[in-house]
Image (cartoon, grey):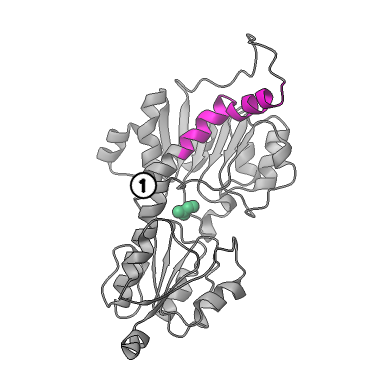
Amino acid sequence: MREKLASRPLMILTSALPGEAASLCEHRVRLRVFKARGRRTEEEVLHCLSRADGAVTLLTDPVTASVLSRCPHLKVVSNVAVGTDNIDLEAAARLGITVTHTPDVLTEATADLAWALILGVARRVSEGDRMVRAGRFKGWSLALLLGMDLRGKTLGIVGMGRIGQAVARRAPAFGMRVAYTQRHRLPDSVEASLNARFAALDDLIGAADVLTLHSPLKTETRHLLGAERLAAMKPGALLINTGRGPLVDEEALVARLQSGHLGGAGLDVYEREPLLAPGLRRLPNVLLLPHLGSAARETREAMARMAVADCLAVLEGHPPEHAVAVGKGQ
Ligand code: GLV
């Protein structure tokens, strides 16, 4: 019996997972669960992964080329996230390691959160909350904390993948027009069903009253919104980011908000997460969340199950359902 157990592959979780996901592993692998540590260093990730055959990782784990190259048994890394920018996909492919992620199950929760930020910034929800808590609310007043009407305004969506489209689907409820940009234009039928018009990135930036970012972070999308493009946004426009922090030059964003050029920002992600650019936290017209995009109970449980199921699939010699990079033998 002991011998049989030792011959099972070693699967590691870099953190305990929500729900029942870990129970899928019973009698199939040897399981080792590490204590959640927030953002780990490469050496700490290596310590978790070095003897593993399969690993379930978080977006705060830097799974770099240097880490991957020092894990001789590793066949699969399953990230509990849709984004995989914490993993060196090229190195994984070179080393024959499969990488999986958790698309679809988090789409609606993340789109909901983007709208929470849009509504929150447009209607100055956190400013109002802070005013009431601080005892500064002295009674209703005609001009108190006036925000932006969304009806009739243009919602600009950068990145019209699953989440961008889910954000677009909610727009008619708030009377917003939708324009979008991404590398490949959507088929006419999809554009028609979303009532969304395609625009080149720079045209979209100049036209949007609310610009919301849903592109993956890659070398070519880092600082997609740099100082120049931020300066080209419509005066008074709002910027929403639930994608990845480095899509935006955060210091340039702070400058645009401080100057009053932009009307506000709703951020769930940061360029040097969890650090904030100097001055950001002191701005009244920003709503700042601690990377909560998919943080709804059922969603996180579904993400955990998906990652574990894909990791097990690879360890048992089957193709995973949600691969972003496929290793040897898959
Ligand atoms: C969250 O940011 C994710 O990529 O799932």
Q: What residue is at 51 percent from the left and 56 percent from the top? A: 217
Quarter of the C terminus within the rendering: bottom left
Question: Relative to residue 249, is residue 124 depicted above or below?
Answer: above
Of 152 and 72, the residue lying toward us: 72
Q: Residue furthest front?
A: 1
Quarter of the N terminus within the rendering: bottom left
Based on the picture, tell me whether residue 200 belongs to the magenta stretch: no
Answer whether residue 209 is visible to the viewer in this image: no
Question: Relative to residue 155, is residue 94 depicted above or below?
Answer: below
Element on which disc 1 rests? helix
Residue 275's spot in the image, x, y percent?
68, 52
Of 135 and 92, the residue lying toward us: 135
Of 267 and 5, the residue lying toward us: 5
Magenta residues span 113-135
Q: What residue is at 32 percent from the left and 62 percent from the top? A: 322
Residue 154's spot in the image, x, y percent?
46, 28
Question: Relative to residue 36, is residue 270 depicted above or below?
Answer: above
Q: What residue is at 28 percent from the left and 43 percent from the top? A: 187
Q: Quadrant of residue 163?
A: top left
Q: Residue furthest bottom?
A: 3
Of 73 and 177, the residue lying toward us: 73
Q: Classify 10 Å Cα crowding around label 1: few (below 14), some (14-19), many (20 and above).
A: some
Residue 85's spot in the image, x, y percent?
50, 61
Based on the picture, tell me whether residue 128 belongs to the magenta stretch: yes
Residue 138 as seen in the image, left or right of residue 32 = right
Magenta stretch, main secondary structure, is helix
Answer whether residue 24 is visible to the viewer in this image: yes
Residue 323 as seen in the image, left or right of residue 116 = left
Three-letter code, disc 1: Arg
Residue at image mark 1: 162
Question: Relative to residue 9, is residue 154 depicted above or below?
Answer: above
